[in-house]
Image: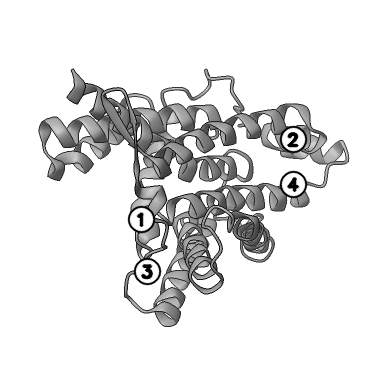
Amino acid sequence: MDIFLQVLINGLMLGGLFAITGVGLTLIFGIVKVVNFAHGEFLMVGMYATYLLTTQFGVHPYVTVIAVAPMLFVLGVLTQRFLIQPLITARNQDIQIFATVGLSTALINLALLVFGADIAATPAAELRSSIQLGPVRILTGQLVIFLTAGALVLGLHLFLQHSQAGRAIRAVAQHRAAAQLMGINVNRVYMITFGLGAACVGLAASLVAPLYPTSPSIGTYFVLTAFVVVVLGGLGSIGGAFLGAMIIGLIDSFAGFYVGSDLREVAVFGVFLLILILRPSGLFGGRLNLSHVS
């Protein structure tokens, strides 16, 4: 039973990691209706920024979020304004996807040019220490990520439901033309939303960097799982993305322990394929009310 509880807790902590990296992705898709294939590279940029601020200036990794999240917000706004927005009226909407794929490739190669292919480790030994809670042990950094993921989902829900900007965002998500007729600046809403989604991944970068080595390809690992989480939770559903992340984290943890570590990704992507076949809208698509913006 102790082993089962440990595997269960590991799965929930892993789910928190997937949630905090996937929430920004589902926010962007739910409102801007663009699948951002550069989402993982935004995370990589944030992790390198965390690494530099920590090693060069002695800033604690968690404190770097004060600079990293706004930096990623600006990067998201610029991406929407100068890369996505000119393509919104394009006859073939798939060109927006190709644009984000191109941005992803450009960011990876820029990181290789600046940092090389070597792995960078953000120093924070205390965040890799464990906390004993009864029969289970939890890494301090993992617990912080899990709690922050829950707070982020709740904060986004309150923002979207109760703020004027949040209501404008939900109006654009529901009907772009009607929102524009009501005087809402749709292009500005898109830029703010893309910026918020990128800022979320900036927050994730500052929390993830102390636990995972940073490299130009690190974003690929996280973004693939983030896409599974978003599809499982229902495209555009922030609450669904959180619950989907918990499910994927548990599948990954139990499959890795009871089936084999080399079959963890097989189990995760097997679930992904089943969801696409049986329920393309996701498990919670259209039914979960928590910040369902699309």
The numbered dot on residue 120 is 3
Q: Would residue 155 be seen by someone viewing this image from the given angle?
A: yes
- Distance, label 4 to label 1, CA atoms, is 33 Å
Query: What's the residue at 45%, 35% (across, down)?
Result: 146
- Considering depth in this image, is 17 or 54 the residue closer to the camera? 54
Indicate which disc, 2 or 4, sits on the residue closer to the N terminus.
2
Q: Which residue is mark 1?
A: 212
- Distance, label 2 to label 3, CA atoms, is 37 Å
Amino acid tagged 4: Val
Position in image of residue 12 (x %, y %): 36, 30
For label 4, the SS is helix
Camera-near label (3 vs 4) is 3
Camera-near label (2 vs 4) is 2
Position in image of residue 63 (x %, y %): 59, 55
Camera-near label (2 vs 3) is 3
Query: What's the residue at 41%, 78% (across, down)?
Result: 115
Q: Which residue is mark 4?
A: 189
